[in-house]
Amino acid sequence: MKIAIIGGGWVGKRLAKYLTERNHHVIVTTTTPDKITELKTVAAEVHLLDFTEVSETDFLNDAEIAIFSMPISQNSWHQGFESISNVFPKTILFSSTGIYPQQNRIFTENDTDHLREDILNSEMKVLEKYPQTIILRLGGLMGDERSLKNFFKNKTVPRPEKLVNYIHYEDILASIDLLLHSDKPAGIYNLVAPEHPSMGEILNIEDKNTMFKTDLPLQRIISSELFVHEFGYTFIHPNPKCF
């Protein structure tokens, strides 16, 4: 299968390697010339695609699937996306759970009020051009060097009681593999690990003030139950404490 990954960043590079190892013909784009050599080790083709100007995209013509893996909240993304006029049988967009407001409750895909405008506009722009798109709203990206222990090395955690909404990149890769073989035409799904420990629990901060009690008020939690239900998915890494 010929698969185009638009955006060879942290997730895009890992996805390219994963799909190449499964004998797919992978095309990756990058906005950074210095990354081309590195990306050539994980993809059959690497192309420079400058999202700040209109770019030539004929190299995408034969792709059966396009996966948009770039920071869609950045303004430069919109102009670059407008230059893509290729036709793709299937498209997948990596969005963000940052679209949901900072309110202490459980959020599902049915929540449509007070969504973050820039992310929502990007999602709608993709759906207008590619109505068949499956949108994955990803939680905080974790795995390998991306961990709370690295982020807060020699730093104080401001809110150790805060519950996390993280996703391990290996679950993103496995989910994409599942979607490649799915007949689902379109949809919006949250992709977040089903367990939500506090930052303090993950970092093993001593609970001197019983701040990690289970009877604390409800916090902001993003639910992935819809994705699990519709695709029968079992998380490889369900608990961020074990990332």
Image: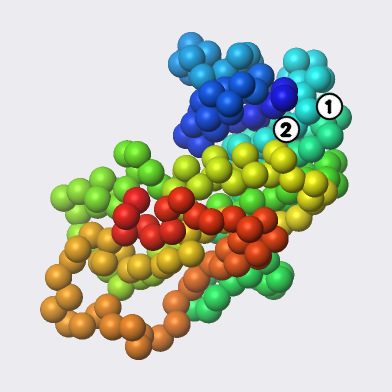
Question: Is 125 on the left or on the right of 238, as rendered?
Answer: right
Tag in front: 2 or 1: 2
Q: Could you tell me the amino acid type at mark 1?
A: Asn
Residue at figure coordinates x 25%, y 66% from the top left: 200
Badge 2 marks a residue whose secondary structure is strand
Of 60 and 243, the residue lying toward us: 243
Residue at figure coordinates x 58%, y 26% from the top left: 22
Q: Which residue matches tag 1?
A: 86
Pinpoint residue 2: horizontal percent, then vertical percent.
72, 23
Q: Could you tell me the amino acid type at mark 2?
A: Ala
| Disc assigned to residue 66 | 2
Pinpoint residue 47: horizontal percent, then vertical percent.
63, 15
At label 1, counting other C-alpha atoms closer than 10 Å, the crowd grade (few under 14, some 14-19, many 20 or more) is: some
Q: Are marks 2 and 1 in contact (CB under 8 Å)?
A: yes
Q: Cα distance, mark 2 to mark 1? A: 10 Å
At label 2, counting other C-alpha atoms closer than 10 Å, the crowd grade (few under 14, some 14-19, many 20 or more) is: many
